[in-house]
Amino acid sequence: MFSRLAVRRAPRLASMSVRYSSSVKEGSVAQSRGFKERESAVESEYVHKQEQAYLKKLKADIELKKIELEKLEKEHAEAEKK
C-alpha cells in the first residue's frame, strides 16, 4: 500500500515544484537598465574622485618644485656675485 501512495504522490510533488519556481532568470538584475545606469554612475564618480585626488597631489608637487626652484635660483645668483 505504501508503494502505491509513493507512486501516486511523486508526480504531484514534481509538478508543484515546477509551478512555484521563479520565472526570473539568474543574473537578470545585472541585465536591467537601471542597474547598468547606476553602476556606470558609481564608476564615474569613483574615477572622478581618483582624478581629483591625483590632480591635488600634482598641484602640491608643483608648488614644492617652485619653492625648490626659487631656492636654487637664489643660490645661483649669490654664487655668480662672488
Image (tube, rainbow, N blue to C red):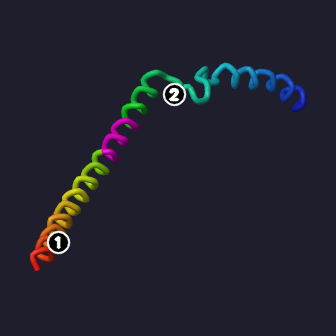
Residue for point 15% across, 65% down: 70
Task: Give the extent of the magenta segment.
Answer: 43-51
Q: Earlier in the sequence, mark 2 or mark 1?
A: 2
Q: Nearer the viewer, residue 71 or 21?
A: 71
Q: Classify residue 40 as left or right of residue 15.
A: left
**Is residue 49 a member of the stretch shown in magenta?**
yes
Residue 35, given in percent of the width and then of the height, sits at 45, 28
Which residue corresponds to mark 1? 76
Left or right: residue 65 versus residue 82 is right
Q: Is residue 68 magenta?
A: no
| Residue displayed at 70% across by 22% down | 18
- Mark 2 and mark 1 residues within 8 Å of each other at the beta carbon: no
Q: How many marks?
A: 2
Q: Label 2: few (<14), some or many (≥20) within 10 Å?
A: few
Give the number of the mark in front: 2 or 1.
Answer: 1
Question: In the rendering, at what x and y percent does residue 49 appear?
Answer: 31, 44
| The quadrant where residue 51 appears | top left
Q: Which three-letter amino acid code belongs to the residue tagged 1? A: His
**Residue 45 in which image quadrant:** top left
Q: Is residue 25 left or right of residue 67?
A: right
Q: Which mark is residue 29?
A: 2
Q: Given the image, on which type of amino acid does mark 2 rest?
A: Val
| Alpha-carbon span between mark 2 and mark 1 | 66 Å
Q: Quadrant of the C terminus?
A: bottom left
Q: Is residue 16 above or below residue 49?
A: above
Q: Position of residue 80 (x, y in %)?
A: 14, 74
Please provide percent x and percent y for residue 77: 12, 71
Q: Secondary structure at mark 1?
A: helix
Q: Main secondary structure of the magenta part?
A: helix
